[in-house]
Image: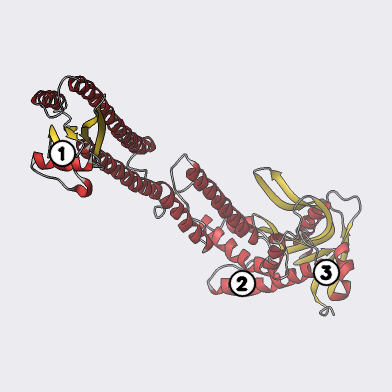
Amino acid sequence: MSESSETRTHRPRFSLSVKLSIGLTLIIGILFSAINVWNITTHREARRRDAANAASTIMSIAASTLVSELANTALQSERFKTVVRNIGTTNKNLNSDDKTLAYLLVTDNQKRVITGFAKPSVTVFPGGVTYQDEQTVLENIAKLEGNLGGFMRAKSFKFTVPQTGEQGRLLVGLSLAQVEVEGRRDLIVNLGVLFAALVALLIYSSMTLSRMVIQPITAIMSSMRKLRDGDLSTRANIRRSDEIGILADTYNFMVQGLSEREKLKDAFNRYVSKQVYKQLEAGAIRLTGEQREATILFSDIRSFTALSEQLTPRDVVTMLNEYFNEMVEIVFKHDGFLNKFIGDALMAVYNAPIEQPEPELRAVRTALEMLDALQKLNQKRTGRGQFPLRIGIGINTGPVVAGNIGHEQRLEYTVIGDAVNLAQRIESQTKVTGSSLLISETTYAKIAKYVIAEALPPVKMKGKQEAVALYAVQALRRAPA
């Protein structure tokens, strides 16, 4: 199948496997980022739980120790304060890496600070308020009883001594600010990567969709528009093995079929008149084998062999083309079917492949006009210093078999039968009788009232047991009503 440079689509710069690999890499990146986001979220929740558990652990250890101490000493004693400070120092050192332990203090029943410690940098009060002074931080924690909210996780324990009742409270608080900052940072980074990967995948998908789908479909549509405008040379030359490639190949196959059909149409249109072809195109004519009565016209240039020996091959072809151009137009004028050229001979058929009124009269009219046209052509030829041409025409009417005959790859619509052979032999008798137009008795019987003809003696012909009656036609008697 030929390629048009106007519609040629070059091979893509990257193979389909490379494109798929890039797309798969982006998808894996998106999945990885999404998993990281999920891991960060779950890890942050786990650290929150760990912080709460750490606060509970510190509270349990400190409370157990301090309750034992209160059994032997008072809440305001220096010994008790020393024990509290030691507990705070120990836990503060253990939590220095994570910086999650924000404060540990003991208050009395009036919410006054007995002792303790706090980290102002990580202790955040409601509304995001912070204080730089540790004592101020401790006093405000005592007032709020450790209920700071936000990123703060607090535990409270009441000191109850038998017989004296509640002595005070132990408040332990952990800050999740560092956890939240780190988690938010990781989350932002991973969300950024996820968003960038999504954008890259979107851009890549758009470009790939455009290159792999939209552009080839646009090329096919462009070719379709050219086809609609009658350009049968257009092709959608897309070299692909996917569904779009199959679509392009199918389209090209269809265009190729249309092109061949158009060529066949043009070729067949050279053998029949436009009126006959319209009926053929409409499906009103059957080209399969059928028997019908037809009128066959044979014409032949007399002494053609001797004439052609005087000319070059180029001159012979030029002469025949000029002659046939005149004769064929007359055949078409009367809706004859130009069956074939046999060298210098011409065979035309009437009443096949379509039914026609008065096919015999059409054939005779064609023959008489051919003779008139030959006289005018000879005037041109003699004016150019060329020898005139003489032709003989034979017409016969009879049953024939009409249809497509030949090889399945090379069929020809034609008519065969004894009536065809007889028409050719009648034409050969024009050389014997000297008459330019001879018709058979079957033809004459149908148009006797329309022609001026001379009956000739019956002639014995090959393939016929009885002599064949012939009539030499001089002119039409009168136009039929």
Residue at figure coordinates x 73%, y 59% from the top left:
283
Neighbour tally class for label 1: few under 14, some 14-19, many 20 plus, Cα within 10 Å: some
What residue type is disc 2 on? Leu
Residue 112: give its label.
1
Q: Position of residue 97 (x, y in %)?
A: 15, 28
Residue at figure coordinates x 84%, y 75% from the top left:
452
Q: Which one is in front, 379 or 112?
A: 112
Neighbour tally class for label 2: few under 14, some 14-19, many 20 plus, Cα within 10 Å: some
Q: Position of residue 49 (x, y in %)?
A: 30, 30
Q: Which one is in front, 408 or 199?
A: 199
Q: CA distance from mark 3 to mark 2?
A: 28 Å
Circle 2 sits on which residue? 377
Q: Position of residue 84 (x, y in %)?
A: 14, 26
- In primary-sequence order, the first of circles 1 and 3 is 1
Residue at figure coordinates x 40%, y 55% from the top left:
6
Residue 202 in view here: yes
Residue 284 falls in which quadrant of the image?
bottom right
In front: mark 1 or mark 3?
A: 1
Circle 3 sits on which residue? 358
What residue type is disc 1 on? Arg
Residue 470 in view here: no
In front: mark 2 or mark 1?
A: 1
Outermost residue, front direction?
163
What residue type is disc 3 on? Glu
- In primary-sequence order, the first of circles 3 and 2 is 3
In front: mark 3 or mark 2?
A: 3
- In primary-sequence order, the first of circles 2 and 1 is 1
Residue 193 falls in which quadrant of the image?
top left
- Horizontally, is 207 left or right of 119 in the view? right
Residue at figure coordinates x 40%, y 48% from the top left:
209
